[in-house]
Image (cartoon, rainbow, N blue to C red):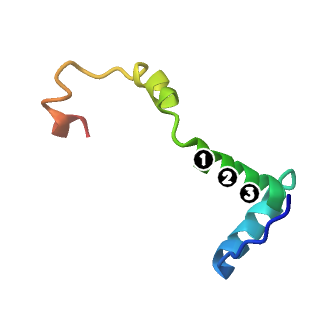
Amino acid sequence: MKRTIHLPDELARQIEEYLAQHPEENWSSLAQKGFKQAIRGKDPSKLLAVAGTVELPADASINEDVYH
């Protein structure tokens, strides 16, 4: 299916620059990735998977300023 969309000039320039650096991509593949990500939404399971891998001292929640 073909669709016509309007992009601001600056965004189009940025896309062209990105595509020049990523020859395996094209306008269609990039748009498809963006659309899929937008309709899929955030996947909190990926964040939760790494959340348990960070070890903090027991007092980190009450002494926040010490650990910055």
Asked if 8 appears above or below 43 in the picture, the reply is below
Which comes sooner in the sequence, label 1 or label 3? 3
User: Callout 3 environment at 10 Å: few (<14), some (14 to 19), or many (20+)?
Assistant: few
**Tally of numbered discs:** 3
Name the residue that disc number 3 marks.
31
Residue 37 position in % (x across, y down): 62, 46
How far apart are labels 1 and 2 at the CA level? 6 Å
Q: Residue at x 75, y 52 (%)?
A: 32
How far apart are labels 3 and 2 at the CA level? 6 Å
Name the residue that disc number 1 marks.
39
Q: Nearer the viewer, residue 67 or 17?
A: 17
Relative placement, left or right, of 10 versus 3 is: left
Spot the residue most to the bottom: 9
Tag 3 and tag 2, C-beta contact below 8 Å: yes
Q: Residue at x 70, y 76 (%)?
A: 6
Tag 1 and tag 2, C-beta contact below 8 Å: yes
Name the residue that disc number 2 marks.
35
Name the mark nearer the viewer: 1 or 3.
Answer: 1
Q: Nearer the viewer, residue 55 or 15?
A: 15
Tag 1 and tag 3, C-beta contact below 8 Å: no
Residue type for callout 3: Ala
Asked if 17 appears above or below 32 in the picture, the reply is below
